[in-house]
Amino acid sequence: MNRTQDLKTEKHHIPVVDRTPLEPPPIVVVVMGKKVGKSTLIQCLIQNFTWQKLMEIRGPVTIVSGKKHRLTVIECGCDINMMIDLAKMADLVLMLIDAGFGFEMEMFEFLNICQVHGFPKIMGVLTHLDSFKHNKQLKKTKNSLCAFTESCNPELPL
């Protein structure tokens, strides 16, 4: 009788193991766009953080960016299923926009998918700005693309 009571009281005093991880999970960065230099941007990010070149990107790449900070960079294709999966898990989206062409349908689809699954932080990046010959045309394009994104979604930082 005393033994069973001792066992019951022992169970109440079992120390709880701290199961919190020592390092936080990596920040998931999704690079999205259509024929605008996604792979080049990812290669430059990797070279900036690691001082090593990565010639071919196959799948997600995890980079150590600080003592306790890691980044997982994932390239998003124009497949709708891939967009849905990455919108659910993304912490930050780098949306690459071709300045010469403007917005494409895939970008609006991805924005709608992100809106449904809880908006991650989205950062617009204009590419192919070197194709403009005159500064006046470049400024006009920048202003029109920025004004359009602010009218569609004021929370979208571009």
Image (spheres, rainbow, N blue to C red):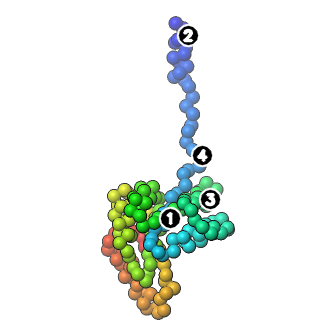
Give me the disc on residue 22: 4
- State how far apart marks 4 and 3 are (Cα): 15 Å
* SS for dot 3: strand
> Mark 1 Cα within 10 Å, few/some/many (few <14, many 20+)?
many
Q: Earlier in the sequence, mark 2 or mark 4?
A: 2
Is there any visible trace of residue 94 in the rendered image?
yes
Identify the mark nearer the N-term, 1 or 2. Answer: 2
Q: Relative to residue 23, is residue 134 depicted above or below?
A: below
Q: Is residue 9 left or right of residue 50?
A: left
Residue at position x 55%, y 42% in the image = 20
Q: Quadrant of residue 64?
A: bottom right
Looking at the image, tell me whether mark 1 or mark 3 is earlier in sequence order. Answer: 3
Which amino acid lies under the numbered mark 4 shown in the image of this protein? Leu
Q: As shown in the figure, which amino acid type bears the numbered disc 1?
A: Glu
User: How far across and how far down the image is residue 56, in percent?
Assistant: 60, 67
Q: Quadrant of residue 141?
A: bottom left
Kindly state the secondary structure of the residue where label 4 is placed: loop
When the figure is inspected, residue 87 is found, relative to residue 39, above or below; the finding is: above
Measuring 38% from the left and 69% from the top, which residue is drawn there? Answer: 106
N-term-proximal mark, 2 vs 3: 2
Residue density around tag 3, few if under 14, some if 14–19, many if 20 or more, within 10 Å: some
Instruction: Please name the residue that numbered disc 2 is placed on.
Output: 3
| Mark 2 vs mark 3: in front | 3
